[in-house]
Amino acid sequence: MTYLRKYRERKYLMRIMLSINLLIVASMLASLLSAYMYSKKISLDSQQEANEKVLSQINYNISYMNETVKNFAISLYYDNDMAHLLFSREPDRFEDTLRINKLNKTIAYNSFIHSIVFYNSKRDTYFTSGDDAISNPKSNLLDITKSFLAGTKSLYKMQLMPIAYMPNTERPDNAQEIFSLYMYDSLEAYNKTDSALIINIKPEWLFQKLELMNARSDDPSNRIFILDQNKEIYSPVAPADEGLAELKDEIYRRINASNHEVSQFTYTLDGRKQIVNYMANASTNWIIVNIEPYTGALASIVQLKKVFITVAAISFGLALLASLFVSNKLYTPVSVLLKQTERMPGVGIGRPQGKDEFSYVTDIYDRLVEKLASEQSRQAGNENIICSYHLRKLVTDSTTIAPDELKSYRERGYLKTDLEWPFVLGVLKVDDYKKLKATRGLDLKLLQFAISNIVQEVVSEVLPVDAVDLREEHFVLLFDIGQPDEETYERISASMRKAQTIVNDLYHITFTVALSDIVPAYGELTYYYERTLDYLQYRMNVGANAVITPQIVREKQDNHDAQIPPELERKLIEGIKSSRQEQVHLELDRIRGVISGMSSDAVIQSVVHLGIIIKQTIREINQNKVSPLTLDLRSIDGLVFEKETLDEIFEAFVQILDAIFVDHKAVVENKVQVIVDTIKDVIQANYANANLSLQEISDLLKMSPAYVGRIFKKYETVSVADYINEVRLQNAVVLLEKNNWQVNEISEKVGFSSQSYFFKLFKKRYGTTPKDYRIKKSMGL
């Protein structure tokens, strides 16, 4: 029991055994199943080929018999001697007897002929010869023949038709069968005025072949039968339609669906699966059908299936023994590993339930790694704190750093750059830092750390660089430029622009970098750091996501302009007062171009001055307005402190001034709308006045007719005259529906001086005359 318990604990060993067995069994089953399916297919194909050969032989015999009988019928039908029996109008007993005797001799020489019938439609007489069943009064064969000619049964010309008859009607159990072929002159359906030749054929030779084929198997469900033109079943061993009605329908359905004259399919008959082969005979429209049990056809395959199952069971047992041996060999290293882990300090001897060996070893390894990482993290954290302290001290108080101390920074890995040589300092600041700081869920420290790593990785491809986090809105970059040359700043700028692109693609965030002049010695680092912070202020001039070099700063500092040109101020004020939006935008662009070339201090002064000019101009506009502009002028004062670049400041100026133009446009539109509404009110109140016109309305409003007509049509899309007529017609309709006044009275009451003009407009508007309109409304139409 102890050994069994330990064996169950070896879950990984059990997993190996199970995997090996599953692979072996799956591969073996797949192979055996493929072999079984392929053998089954070959057996079915072979069976189909054999059945089709049998059906082809029977089909050939039927076609041969049909052609033989057809040829015999044609020769007999067109025989001059026999024509007398078919077409003579007057009876001639002597000639008729001679021809009947000749016919008897013909039948005697042809063993397959049962009997022959000549029907003379001119005399309505039947001449018979051959088997006594055709002339015996107790036989119903001649009656069946007459019923075909009378049209009570389907008749197929020049095709053998199976017919069942009784030689003696007093013994109905003794039924027999023949094949009959009918020949007559009509090309289509039989006409009762036509004479006909009927040849009856003995079926014994064909049925003998069917009986021989059916005798191949002792199973009664294995049989061959024929479906004739009328879908009737003929078989020498099975009663007609016995359990085969649905199968017969399925055969015809498949023939109609696929148009295949030869095919094989499986079918369940009386609860047993059968293989059905059929072949259509084109000359007689018969279908030869062969049915045999599915199990009988695949008996050898069933035996093969048993062999496969036996082989699979034996193979599985052998695989189980082999996997036990192999898995124990494979498990040896795992056993050694478990014994070694048990000797580790702090590790228990037992294992938690539900875990395999490797999960147990992995847990031990994870605990050891976690413990080691915790110790290393503690030591690294202390080291990072010391490193950050020394680098911040180097930037903010470089004069106190001795050469030996700087050397120790490089030896301890704090610095990658050699500050004993000239170098360049950069100050990097994230754009829109205040907005980002207000964003919930955004870790700015982590973001700056990511940007610092990206910048160092990109720049280090060109030259060594160090990043110093000053725990402010920016951090410092130290570029080891080696020997300075003319392309020094170009190399640094190119690498910084590449880093800007990467950061923007990853985080959709931009940053600006200001580069210092070349620092001659590390002792002056703090001084150049302060100057570079001043350089960073020129971000307002050049915009966000920029690289500010000392050359850009000197160009701005060398520009001694410190104020906006008075001419530009005057044109801006004129544009604001006259509401010329395009002129205001143009002058703002010109002013921005002037301000962007100034020094940083002059930029701030000029922006503040521009804000004052805009506020004074808006106040002057409001003093002369009945409805003053509703603008918050205090928002202009905070633009310098809220916005970081001139682009943002001037975009705000444009939005403020555009609000003025929108307000002015709204006032104009309101004024025009008041005039249009007044015109409508005048028309509604005076439409009954026949003299009401555009001139009278204009005189009433004390405006020119041209102005009144233009603004009314612009806002209402119809002229004043058309609107007057529309109001008159609407009121005329009301009067027609609610009063019994005459139409000419209504025309005058709504302001039409001409009755014909009223009729014309009314019919154009409503598609009918006023009288007809009133009649239709009274009738509810």
Image (tube, rainbow, N blue to C red):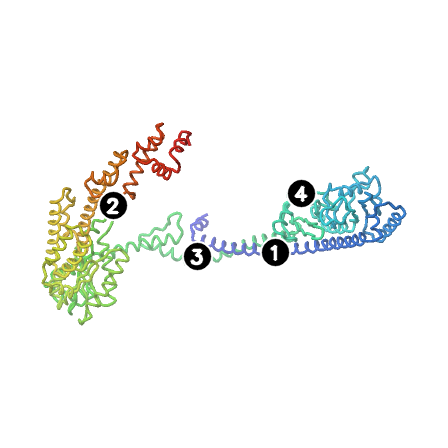
Mark 2–mark 1 Cα distance, whole angstroms, equals 96 Å
Secondary structure under tag 4 reads helix
Secondary structure under tag 3 reads helix
Mark 3–mark 2 Cα distance, whole angstroms, equals 101 Å
Answer whether labels 2 and 1 touch (C-beta < 8 Å).
no
Query: Relative to residue 590, is residue 218 drawn left or right?
Result: right
Picture coordinates of residue 497 (x, y %)? 23, 63
Q: Quadrant of residue 389?
A: bottom left
Mark 2–mark 4 Cα distance, whole angstroms, equals 91 Å
Residue 271 sits above or below residue 297 on the image: above
Amino acid type at image mark 3: Tyr
Amino acid type at image mark 2: Arg
Query: Relative to residue 143, is residue 595 drawn left or right?
Result: left
Residue 53 sits above or below residue 713 on the image: below
Picture coordinates of residue 6 (x, y %)? 43, 50
Residue where numbered disc 1 is placed: 39
Mark 3 is surrounded, within 10 Å at the Cα level, by few (under 14), some (14 to 19) or many (20 or more) other residues, namely some
Mark 4 and mark 1 lie on one chain; the one further toward the N terminus is 1
Residue where numbered disc 3 is placed: 331
Residue where numbered disc 4 is placed: 245
Residue where numbered disc 2 is placed: 710
